[in-house]
Image (tube, rainbow, N blue to C red):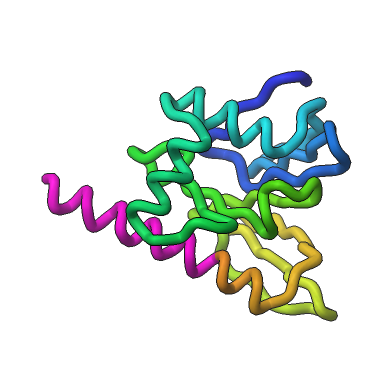
Amino acid sequence: MKNYEINSRTLAIVPVGENLTNVLEEDNEFMINMNSMKIIEKSCEFFGSSYMGRRTGTKVLTGISHKSPIIIEESTNMIYFPTTSPRLIGCIWIALDKIKEYREVNGKILVFFKNGRKIFINISYGSFDNQYLRATKLEYILRSRKKLKN
C-alpha cells in the first residue's frame, strides 16, 4: 500500500525504517511504503489542515512547541502524540483516545489499547508519561473550548 490516512480505527503509526511504516489498527496491522511523518502530514491534509498548522495550533492552545501532540481531526478529538522528536526516524505516533493504560516493563513501555491490543515501545516511563499528559492537556483544552462554543 502506498497511501494511508489516519482514521478512527488507527491505534499507532510505527516506523520500520526510513520509508516503511507498520500501521496498527483496531482490527488490522499492515505495512505502508511511506515514512511515518509523511503519514501524519498527509492525514492532517486529508482533514483540511497542514502538519505545521496543527503544530502551531498546539503551541497556541498549550504552549507546547517540542514533541508536540497534534490534532489530526478536531470534531472527533483525534489526537496523536509522538514518542520522540518527530524528526527522528524511530518516532512512533500513538492515538491518545485508544489508550487504556500503560506501564513500565523491563525499561520499556507496554501500551494496552482499549480493544485489547498492545505494543512495546522503547522509551522510558517518564518520557512516555510526559507525552501522554501533554496530549491529555491538549484534549482537555480542545473539549473545554468546544463546550464554550455550544
Q: Is residue 143 left or right of residue 79?
A: left
Quadrant of the frame with the N terminus: top right
- In magenta, the rendered stretch is 132-150
* Above or below for 116 versus 7: below
Q: Residue furthest top?
A: 2
**Quick check: 27 left or right of 14?**
left
Residue 135 on the magenta span: yes
Q: Is residue 148 found left or right of 110 in the rendered image? A: left
| Front-most of residues 132 and 31 | 132
Q: Position of residue 95 (x, y in %)?
A: 56, 50
Q: Quadrant of the C terminus?
A: top left
Determine whether 1 is above or below 8 in the image.
Answer: above
The residue that appears at 49% across and 69% down in the rendered structure is 133
- Main SS, magenta region, reads helix
Residue at (71% x, 47% y) in the render: 87
Rendering coords of residue 44 (x, y %): 51, 31
Q: Residue at x 65, y 49 (%)?
A: 93
The percent position of residue 53, horizontal first and vertical second, equals: 44, 36
Residue at x-position 54% and y-position 66%: 132
